[in-house]
C-alpha cells in the first residue's frame, strides 16, 4: 500500500489507483470512468492513510479523521483525457472514436421530482392507444347491451339501429320472464269435438317496455298428478296472425291465448302451464 497512489474525481468523488505512467499522459489530465468528468489527476491526489491529529488543531481536516469512505476503482477504470487543443481540454467522449460525445450524468437533478424531465419517446403511442381502447370498450358495451339500452332509453334506438345496420346485428325485445305473468288460464274439453281440448290463457307484460314473446310449456297430468304428455308452444303457435313477433309484447299489455289441443290419444285429469325463454 505504501507505493500505491490514489487520485479522486472531484465530481463524483470516486477514488482510483493510478500509476506514474498514467499521470504522465496528457500532463496528468484524466477522465473518470464512472461519471466521465475530466480532471487533473496530479492535483487531485489523495492519501488513504490516516494522519495523526494534533491537539492544537482547531479544525480537523479530512485526512486527519482517518481514511475517507470512498468508492474505490482500479486504474483500468481511469482513462486518459482526450487530446487538448491550444486553449482548452475537449469535452469527455465515449470509448468509440466515431461516437457522439456522451453527456455527463446530471447528479444534481437525478432524484429531483419537482424538476421537468424529458418525456419518453413512446408517450405518443400511449396517447393514441388509450383513446382507441376506450372507443373499443364503449363499442363492445353498446353491442352487448344494445337491447337493454333501446328498451330503457328509447331515444337511443335510432342510433343503435344505425350501428347495427353497419355491423349486421339486430335490436330485439328484452327477455325477462320475471316481468311476465299468466293472469288466468283454463283447459276444457270441446263439447262439439270428442278428444279436443280448448286452452284459454291471458299472458301479461308488467314491464313498461316491450318484452319478447315467451314460449309456453303445457303439461297434461293424470289423477295422480303424473305427467302424461308435455308440449312446448312457440309464440307463432299461440299468437294471432297479425301479431308482430319481432316487436315483442308492448309494455303494460296482455295477450289473450286460445288454442285447440288434440288429446284424443291420451287420458288426463289436470294440466300445468308455464312461461319460459329457450
Image: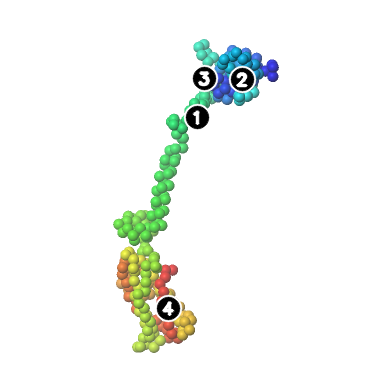
* SS for dot 2: helix
Secondary structure beneath label 1: loop
Question: Which residue is at the front of the view, 153 or 128?
Answer: 153
Whether the residues at callouts 3 and 2 have beta carbons within 8 Å, the answer is no
The CA span between labels 2 and 4 is 101 Å
Q: Is residue 267 left or right of residue 153?
A: right
Quarter of the image with the C terminus in it: bottom left
Q: Which residue is mark 1?
A: 110
User: Going from the N terminus, do you reach mark 2 or mark 4 first?
Assistant: 2
Q: Residue furthest front?
A: 55
- The mark lying in front, picked from 3 and 1, is 1
Percent of width and height locating residue 124: 43, 38
User: Mark 1 or mark 4, which has the lower sequence index?
Assistant: 1
Mark positioned earlier in the residue sequence (3 or 1): 3
In percent of the image, x 34 and y 56: which residue is there? 160
Compare marks 3 and 2 and give the one earlier in the sequence.
2
Residue identified by numbered label 3: 91
Q: CA distance from mark 1 to mark 4?
A: 79 Å
Distance of label 3 from label 1 (alpha carbons) = 21 Å
Say which residue label 4 marks. 272
Which one is nearer the viewer's eye here, 142 or 118?
A: 118
Badge 3: how crowded within 10 Å, few (<14), some, or many (20+)? some
Question: With respect to residue 190, does 147 lie above or below?
Answer: above
Q: Position of residue 166 (x, y in %)?
A: 36, 55
Which label is found at residue 65? 2
Nearest to N terminus: mark 4 or mark 3: 3
- Whether residue 96 is visible here, answered yes or no, is no
Q: Position of residue 155 (x, y in %)?
A: 30, 57
Q: Secondary structure at mark 3?
A: loop
Amino acid at each position: 500500500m505504501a507505493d500505491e497512489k490514489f487520485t479522486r474525481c472531484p465530481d463524483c468523488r470516486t477514488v482510483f489507483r493510478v500509476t506514474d505512467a498514467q499521470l504522465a499522459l496528457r500532463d496528468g489530465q484524466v477522465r473518470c470512468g464512472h461519471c466521465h468528468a475530466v480532471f487533473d489527476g496530479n492535483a487531485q491526489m489523495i492519501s488513504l492513510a490516516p494522519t495523526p491529529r494534533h491537539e492544537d488543531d482547531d479544525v480537523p481536516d479530512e485526512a486527519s479523521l482517518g481514511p475517507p469512505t470512498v468508492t474505490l476503482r482500479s486504474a483500468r477504470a481511469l482513462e486518459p483525457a482526450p487530446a487538448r487543443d491550444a486553449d482548452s481540454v475537449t469535452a469527455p467522449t465515449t470509448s468509440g472514436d466515431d461516437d457522439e460525445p456522451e453527456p455527463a450524468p446530471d447528479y444534481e437533478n437525478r432524484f429531483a421530482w419537482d424538476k421537468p424531465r424529458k418525456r419518453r419517446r413512446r408517450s405518443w403511442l400511449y396517447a393514441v392507444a388509450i383513446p382507441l381502447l376506450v372507443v373499443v370498450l364503449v363499442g363492445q358495451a353498446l353491442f352487448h347491451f344494445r337491447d337493454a339500452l333501446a328498451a330503457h332509453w328509447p331515444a337511443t334506438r335510432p342510433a343503435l339501429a344505425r350501428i347495427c345496420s353497419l355491423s349486421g346485428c339486430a335490436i330485439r325485445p328484452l327477455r325477462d320472464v320475471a316481468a311476465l305473468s299468466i293472469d288466468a288460464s283454463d283447459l276444457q274439453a270441446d263439447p262439439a269435438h270428442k278428444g279436443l281440448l280448448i286452452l284459454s290463457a291471458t299472458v301479461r307484460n308488467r314491464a313498461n317496455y316491450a318484452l319478447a314473446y315467451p314460449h309456453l310449456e303445457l303439461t297434461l297430468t293424470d289423477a295422480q298428478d303424473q305427467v302424461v304428455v308435455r308440449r312446448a308452444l312457440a309464440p307463432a303457435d299461440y299468437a294471432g296472425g297479425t301479431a308482430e313477433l319481432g316487436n315483442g309484447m308492448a309494455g303494460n299489455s296482455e295477450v289473450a291465448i286460445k288454442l285447440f289441443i288434440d288429446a284424443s290419444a291420451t287420458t288426463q285429469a289436470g294440466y300445468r302451464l308455464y312461461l319460459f325463454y329457450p
